[in-house]
Amino acid sequence: MNRSHTRLRLLRPAFTAVCAAVVVGVAAGPAAAHAGVTASDPRALAENVTLSFTSEAESDTAGIAELRVVLPKGIAPDAVTLGDAPKEWKLTATPDGYAIGGPALATGTDAEYSITVRQLPDEKSLVFKTLETYGDGKISRWIEVPADGEKVDNPAPVLQLKAAAPGAKPLAPSPSPSATPGSAPPPEQSAAPSAPAASAGARATSAEEAGSGTGTTVGVVAAALVLVAAGAFWWMRRSRSGA
């Protein structure tokens, strides 16, 4: 009898730990990686603002090779210039934003870069939807915008803005872009020469698969943890019955 009670006392902590792992694993799964943005002057209508971006690496087999960003309303692609970036990475204007990329980073290395924006729009928050492309072609989509405080699996980078400074006014639209030293290469040129560019259809399909991949992985992990917990519970019951 004493031996049975001893076994139960030893099993209870293990069972509790497994249950805790299930809860933590399910809750933390979607937050395993993210993309974020900060600003040197996070105020509406602020001028010449440096925006710093970080995209966390989430692949175990390949490094990040390209980031495609959709600019929020009020920031034109030609009002953006590249600041700091990984070695040999270049910025290319796109119809709705820009692409930045080059040789794929080392596996597990976060992509960090900065841009300078001529002027921030008069808004309360700015969303920078981002497609993260790896050297092996995998695409992660950080494009979801939380609504009513709800959490999402693949949140887009969001910059919260303070009220504009007294007297701040919108600047006149910038002139048409011209070829100048240091300007971004034409959109036709690839921003990621280390990997062949995929077709638009292939990019969209891969992006959809990546968007659902995170949820699928979390579900598999959660299911495995639940099975382990159930096995531990069954073992406890069996030990108690045989006592």
Image (cartoon, rainbow, N blue to C red):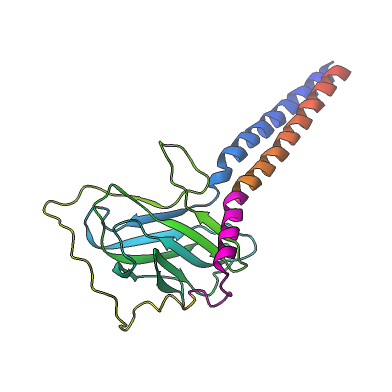
Q: Locate the N terminus and report the quarter of the image it occupies.
A: top right
- What secondary structure characterizes most of the magenta part? helix
Which residue appears at 44% of the width and 59% of the height? 54
Q: Position of residue 198 (x, y in %)?
A: 58, 70
The question of residue 143 being in magenta is answered with: no
Name above or below for residue 151 compared with residue 210: above
- Residue 141 shown left or right of residue 175 in the figure: right
173 relative to 190 in the view: left or right: left
Q: Nearer the viewer, residue 176 or 93?
A: 176
The vertical placement of 223 against 241, above or below, is below
Quarter of the figure with residue 59? bottom right
Q: Residue furthest front?
A: 201
Residue situated furthest left in the rendering: 167
- Residue at horizontal 26 percent and vertical 58 percent from the top: 120
Asked whether the viewer can see residue 243, the reply is no
Task: Farthest residue to the top: give it.
Answer: 1
Residue at the location (61% across, 54% down)?
Answer: 209
What is the quadrant of residue 195 in the picture? bottom right
Q: Is residue 172 left or right of residue 215?
A: left
Residue 203 image point, x, y percent: 56, 63
Residue 95 vs residue 56, the one in the foreground: 95
- Quick check: 242 above or below 144? above
Against 122, is 243 above or below? Answer: above
**Residue at horizontal 47%, vertical 52%?**
143
Which quarter of the picture shows residue 60? Answer: bottom right
Query: Is residue 21 visible in the rendered structure shown here?
Result: yes
Q: Which residues are magenta?
A: 191-213
Residue 212 part of the magenta-drawn span: yes
